[in-house]
Amino acid sequence: MANSPAKPAARESFSSRLGFLLVSAGCAVGIGNVWRFPFVTGKNGGAVFVLFYIVFLIIMGIPTLSMELAVGRASRRSAVDAYRALEPSGSKWHIHGYFCFAGCYLLMMYYTTVSGWMLAYIFKFLKGDFARGMGQAQVQAVYDGMTASPGASILWMAIVVLLGYLCVSFGVQKGLEKISKYMMIALFLLITVLAVHSCFLPGAGRGVSFYLKPDFHRAAEAGMFTIVTEAMNQAFFTLSLGVAAMEIFGSYMQEDKSIPGESVRIAGMDTFVALLAGLIIFPACFSFGVQPDSGPSLIFVTLPNVFTHMAGGRVWGTLFFLFMTFASFSTVIAVFENLLATSMELFHQSRIKAAVLNTIATFALSLPCALGFNVWSGAFSNTPMGNFLGFEDFLVSNILLPLGSLVFVLFCNTKWGWGSDAYFEEVNRGDGMKFPKWFRYYFRYVLPILLLAIFVSGMVTYFQ
């Protein structure tokens, strides 16, 4: 039988439900929403992909999210101690908690560098580095020049690391919650303004139609199996599940609202940002004759090239990368909070000491990615990963996230773990939407198979 933990009386918590929702959504909202989602949608036929994405978000993403939150709220601890508190006596589920801790570090090892590039582009647009009428080769040269400079890459990465840990060093309410609340509100306002502007560009209607009007003939040309597989992957990865990045916020949440309802709201805000990001990118790209399926170069080369041919492009480019910075930084500080909370619990450190030590550790661990496009550019160049960023992203996205989520699902729904009775009691506690008990059969027998399918298909597709 699982242990029934005594919840620590001194545990920090959010001051409001809105704070919990915005911080949790901020963790989910990230580069994957505003970079990966649009180019994967473009590659896979547009609106049909979006339709499947929403379906899989409902049947896979929300249930798995609810399990991370339930483990956090029931234990009032970060991942390692959460497993220890809830696992049956003598079992070793808590070992996965250490993988979660390492996974959050691994995620930040490249996320901080990419977030630094977003921040740098705000200043590049403000300075006029992207002038009206620049050609694609000139736009590409700006990006290449930034990534080829070790000093620039390290500087912008260091700024992200320092600002991120400074924010969370003030605590859950005064730091993480307060800053995330203002940043997420600004993010929602910015993305709405940018989407409205894009939709009124000349010829934008073709982009909106491609994005929102299902065309199964076009989808068949892209390949329905590929579309379904990629939609399943995107619906899962968009919520940052599997490395306890969301579990920590469950440990801070109150018990007056049920977890299924809160999970739906978090997924809804995350999807709102992803869908509006498409309404920024597709109309703009179609308006200027650019295909939005250019992969990693979409944000840093393709879109700046669009802005340089747009009236007022300097202003719109600055606003877009301000929005991108908010989106990426909201994830950065959320994951930093996880690292701090875990360090405080495992090593009995004060918040300030944990912040200082994690600042040093994260900066040092982020150096390979920052230098992977210049000094160490030869590393992994002859592999499918390509560079340090690709290698680190492969480990997180293709291994730790799907397998980590599978562990959470099995822990919550099998007799060898916490068990479905304890999980359903916790997840349905409070007012709001409830999961009916018969869902346990789907969670126990179908959801694990879907997660394994994501893992296997991701590995096969990646190495192909």
Image (cartoon, grey):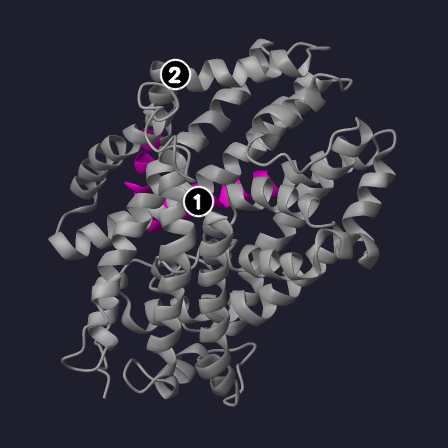
Which residue is denoted by mark 2 in the rendering?
152
Amino acid type shown at disc 1: Thr
x, y percent for residue 449: 47, 74
| Residue for point 44% across, 82% down | 444
Alpha carbon of mark 2 to alpha carbon of mark 1: how far? Answer: 22 Å
| Residue for point 22% across, 39% down | 358
Q: Nearer the viewer, mark 2 or mark 1?
A: 2
x, y percent for residue 428: 47, 80
Q: Please tell me whether the stretch drawn in magenta is mainly helix, strand or loop.
A: helix
Q: Is residue 55 above or below residue 365?
A: below
Residue 170 is inside the magenta segment: yes
| Residue for point 55% across, 13% down | 141
Query: Where does the N terminus fall, quadrant-wise?
Result: bottom left
- Judge by depth and name the residue closer to the eye, 250 or 217: 217
Left or right: 331 in relation to 222: left
x, y percent for residue 121: 53, 21
Which residue is denoted by mark 1 in the rendering?
331
Q: Is residue 233 above or below residue 138?
A: below
Amino acid type shown at disc 2: Ala
Report the span colored magenta.
161-188
Any part of residue 414 in sight = yes
Q: SS for tag 1?
A: helix
x, y percent for residue 418: 30, 80
